[in-house]
Structures are given as C-alpha cells and as structure tokens.
Amino acid sequence: MLNWLFELFTGLPSWAELISFIVFLVLGMVFLIKGADYFVDSASSIAKILGVSTLIIGLTIVSFGTSAPEA
C-alpha cells in the first residue's frame, strides 16, 4: 500500500533518509498530541453538556488513555 513511499526514499543517501524519518517521526508525534488534545476537549465538553460530574469525566478519560495501548 505504501510501496511508493518506500521507493521514494530508496535512492536517497543514508543521511537524507535518516533526516526524512526524523521529520516524519516528529510530524507523527505532533499529530498524535494534537489529536489527543482534541479528543479530550471534545469528550469533556460533551460530558458537560450531558451533565456528568467533572470527577467522572476526568477518571473516564484517564482510564481510556491508560487502557488504549493495551487494547
């Protein structure tokens, strides 16, 4: 599926390949952090609209966050 991406980097020198992988790693981390931020903000605002306690909101978000990597 992503063969075109791998073929794009096969002709590059090793230093350029390393720099491109670092750039992609940093971009992936930025997207992951921003996505998690949007998820937490949206989940807490929906729960507030539904009248759920802030303690329950926090505990639920933390429990999803700690259990997600294991799933």
Image: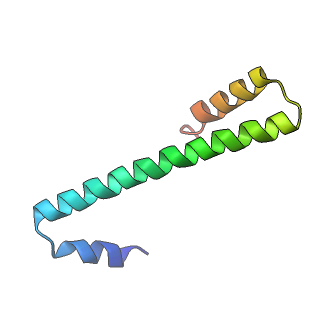
What residue is drawn where x is 33% and y is 58%?
24
What x and y, as percent, mark residue 29? Answer: 41, 47
Q: Is residue 37 above or below residue 1?
A: above
Left or right relative to 8: residue 15: left
Q: Examine the image and state in which quarter residue 43 appears.
A: top right
Q: Nearer the viewer, residue 3 or 42?
A: 42
Query: Residue at point 29% right, 56% down?
Result: 23
The C terminus sits in image quarter: top right
Is 28 situated left or right of 40 in this image?
Answer: left
Instruction: Point out the image quarter for the N terminus.
Output: bottom left
Q: How is the image coloured?
A: rainbow
Q: Is residue 49 left or right of residue 4?
A: right
The number of callouts visible is: 0
Taking the view exactly as shown, the residue that stands out farthest to the right is 51
Q: Residue at x 58, y 31 (%)?
A: 66
- Residue at image coords 27%, 58%: 21
52 to 24, vertically: above or below: above
Q: Return the residue nearer the eye: 69 or 52.
A: 52
| Most foreground residue, 66 or 23 | 23
- Residue 14 position within the rendered picture, expressed as x and y whole percent measured from the top left: 12, 63
Q: Looking at this rendering, what residue extends furthest in the top direction?
A: 55
Image coords of residue 26 (percent x, y): 34, 50
Q: Is residue 8 left or right of residue 55?
A: left
- Residue 25 lies, in percent from the top left, at 34, 52
Specify the quadrant of the image occupied by residue 39: top right
